[in-house]
Amino acid sequence: MGLSELAANVLPQQRSTPDLIADALREAIIQGVLQPGESLRQDEIAKQFGVSRIPVREALRQLEVEGLVNFYANRGAVVSALSPAEVEEIGEIRVALETTAIKLAIPNLTEFDLEKAQSILDAALTETDVARLGELNWEFHTTLYSPANRPRLLGIIKNLHINIERYVRLQMTKMNYVERSHKEHEQILNACRQKDTSTAVRLLKRHIDKAAKELVKYLVLVEKT
């Protein structure tokens, strides 16, 4: 699906134009339609969406905050690329923030929360679409973190997930990651059911660490080729 199709999908929605454009561009970046290092010409994007450059500029600034776009003096907006070192750092930050979130959330987890998390895992088990698997991955994590009642913390975590999402999808397609990730999610959920905070924190840390290290290793190999 190209950018024009993504634009057609989001424009009928009842939301502000900059948000809709940001949604389409974000999905295009995550799907790889727009590649790292690719220039994002505001006039061309505005033409595809049938709008002026003003909402396009606002959308690009929103994606800059999310870490998906960089602005350069001579090139304008460009799709960002994460280096192995940056992926490693994001993994370290995720460990710190997400283990804090789950630690705060576990005492407040209800049976409804646990059942919802399990239903997400059940759906992921039979899902073959990589984009949907990425969405289910975030839904699972946010279901377990939301009861922490720390909206700013969750917002930061979500931004990190958005920033790394395109690389997570790469893991799913090229690194046989899905089955192992599912098993690790099941283990984390079981620890949450038992209100075993120390085990849940340990399992979550290992889950994020392993994924980050494998992705770093892969990106290093790509850089050498």
Image (cartoon, rainbow, N blue to C red):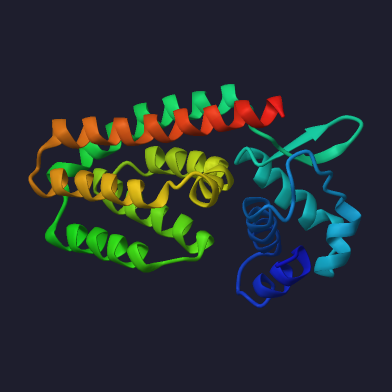
Image vertical order of residue 141 relative to residue 133, above or below: above
Q: Quadrant location of residue 56?
A: bottom right
Direction from residue 141 to residue 37 in the image, left or right: right
Residue sitting at 78 percent across and 68 percent down? Answer: 4
Q: Nearer the viewer, residue 122 or 29?
A: 122
> Is residue 124 depicted above or below 70 in this figure?
below
Q: Residue at x 40, y 53 (%)?
A: 137
Quarter of the picture holding the C terminus = top right
Decide if residue 219 is on the left or right side of residue 172: right
Spot occupied by residue 80 in the image (x, y as percentages of width and height): 71, 37
On screen, residue 36 above or below 140: above
Q: Nearer the viewer, residue 109 or 225?
A: 225
Q: How many marks?
A: 0
Q: Which residue is outermost to the left?
A: 194
Q: Position of residue 39 (x, y in %)?
A: 84, 44
At which x and y percent is residue 130? 51, 59
Say which of 196 and 184 sits in front.
184
**Residue at the location (66% across, 46% down)?**
62
- With respect to residue 28, does 36 lie above or below? above
Image quadrant where one finds the N terminus: bottom right
Rendered residue at 58%/21% (across/down): 85
In front: 219, or 202?
219
Whole-percent x and y of residue 87?
Answer: 54, 29
